[in-house]
Image (cartoon, grey):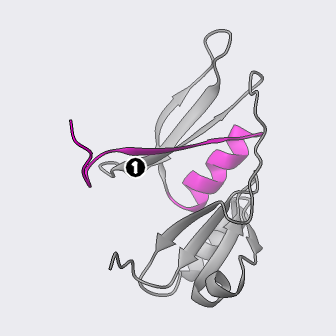
Amino acid sequence: MPLTADTHVRLARPSQDLAAAERFWADGLGLDVLYRGAADGPGEHDLVMLGWPGAAWHLELVGGEHLIVAPSPTAEDLFVLYLDGPADDDLVARLERAGGTRVSAGPYWDRWGITFADPDGYRLVLCTRAWSNG
């Protein structure tokens, strides 16, 4: 089957505290929990999949006592949402209440949006620009 614009994308990240990460992404950003699972044997992880129903992507967070790789985000590990306008004040407040920390992501992103670090340090940018692929 060929890759197309409809090909589903999974972004997977390790998490030290799945409950805290889920609070940020679900309660803060508003993603739905699409699936939750517990480790069922050696080499498996607890996980939570978050996204919007029908979207061609989801965010998968893995953690638990069998987590081998600790989160190691860098300043360039950005999850950018293009809002085509300013971020809603209620959304910003929800993200902060849900454990998000406002951070600088450099002059470009600071000019064009608001950046939060999630509880594991990965960054979410609420970009005021519209997405353009050309």
Give, as a three-letter code, the residue at label 1. Trp
Magenta stretch, residue numbers? 1-30
Work out whether 100 lies above or below 9: below
Residue drawn where x is 65% and y is 66% of the image = 95
Q: Kindly give the residue lying farthest to the top in the view shown.
A: 41
Q: Which residue is mark 1?
A: 57
Q: What is the residue that sits farthest to the left in this orientation?
A: 1
Q: x%, y% of residue 117?
A: 72, 63
Choose top left, top right, bottom left or bottom right for residue 103.
bottom right
Residue 31 pos. (x, y %): 48, 54
x then y, percent, for residue 109: 63, 81
| Residue in the foreground of this view, choosing between 63 and 132 | 132
Q: Does residue 50 appear in the picture of this structure?
A: yes
| As drawn, 44 above or below 89 | above
Q: Position of residue 116 (x, y in %)?
A: 69, 69
Residue 91 seen in the figure: no
